[in-house]
Amino acid sequence: MGDLQLSEKGQLIGKGRLAEVFEWGDTQVLKLFTAERDPAAIAAEARVSQLVHEAGVPTPGTGGVIEVGGRRGIIYDRAVGSPMVGQLTAKPWKLLSFGRMLAQLHASVHERDVDRLPSQREQLEHYIVSADLPTVYRDRALQRLRELPQGTALCHGDFHPDNVLVDGSTATIIDWTTACSGNPVGDFARTSLILQLGALPAGASPWTRIAVRSGRALFYWSYSQRYRRLRRVSQRDLRPWILPIAVARLGQDVTAERDQLLTLIGQDTPTRRGT
């Protein structure tokens, strides 16, 4: 893995908490991680992303790990389209159709089994143990998780509209950092929480807040109805996953959702002795 110069990369086209994405030639992009990112985690992401691509999932293939300006990065094939979340904002009249598209894409992921992926249960256990909560809450979440069936399906682990690129009727899934092998209902539960929770725009007017809440509710309804129909999942199947998924999400330090997650956890966790 040679150390290339920063000048060799192209224009910045995206930026997240852990990495920046740059153009890399005419047909590829470079996901360049912060210096603090664990090299083993970067190598694991490259390996998993390629395994998922080879399984036939609509996601970019990888060109391996390189070093640029002292930072490690992964070369990906360039995908067409822009994030669904931005298109939802620009075209709110497509909320329902985008919700159905997201559901169909998620259901298609769960039809596949991919070998050599991390375990969903072990991944969730790690995040639950890391959650900043009293032990009684973490222990109950762990107990609930261990009572649920594991499964062997491909799960994205962070499936939401910002990780789906849309170009007309074509959709591409990106960011397989938390991909795992497990129970699809757990993956569906995580997406369900992401779509329903989250902070509203700072300083937004009451009307804007109403519009955002209403749009979020419609989008989730469209997504969940289609997914449940495709995968034959009921509310009864979903309900047991909410506690472990909510606690695990706290363990990932999602501060914008903390108050809402604590409310969900409190509703599910008995506080009286003997209950």
Image (cartoon, helix red, strand yellow):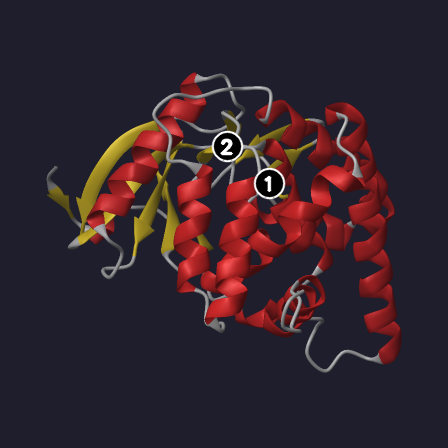
Above or below, 115 relative to 120: above
- Kindly identify the amino acid type of the residue bearing the numbered disc 2: Gly
Q: Residue at x 49, y 62 (%)?
A: 138
**Mark 2 crowdedness (10 Å alpha carbons): few <14, some 14-19, many ≥20:** many
Q: Residue at x 73, y 25 (%)?
A: 231
Residue 271 position, x and y percent, is 65, 72
Comparing 255 with 122, the one in front is 122
Comparing 223 with 154, the one in front is 154
Image quarter of the N terminus: top left
Q: From the viewer's perspective, tell me whether residue 151 is left or right of residue 179.
A: right
Comparing 254 with 136, the one in front is 136
Residue 197's label in the rendered image is none
Above or below, 11 relative to 80: below
- Kindly identify the amino acid type of the residue bearing the numbered disc 1: Gly
Residue sticking out furthest to the left: 2
Q: Are marks 2 and 1 in contact (CB under 8 Å)?
A: yes
Residue 187 placement: quadrant: top right
Residue 158 position, x and y percent, is 53, 46
Residue 109 position, x and y percent, is 58, 26
Residue sticking out furthest to the bottom: 203
**Mark 1 crowdedness (10 Å alpha carbons): few <14, some 14-19, many ≥20:** many
Question: In this orientation, does residue 194 appear?
Answer: yes
Write down the residue under mark 2: 182
Q: Residue at x 49, y 25 (%)?
A: 152
Residue 70 position, x and y percent, is 15, 55
For label 1, the SS is helix
Write down the residue under mark 1: 186
Question: In this orientation, does residue 177 appear?
Answer: no
Q: From the viewer's perspective, tell me whether residue 52 is left or right of residue 274.
A: left
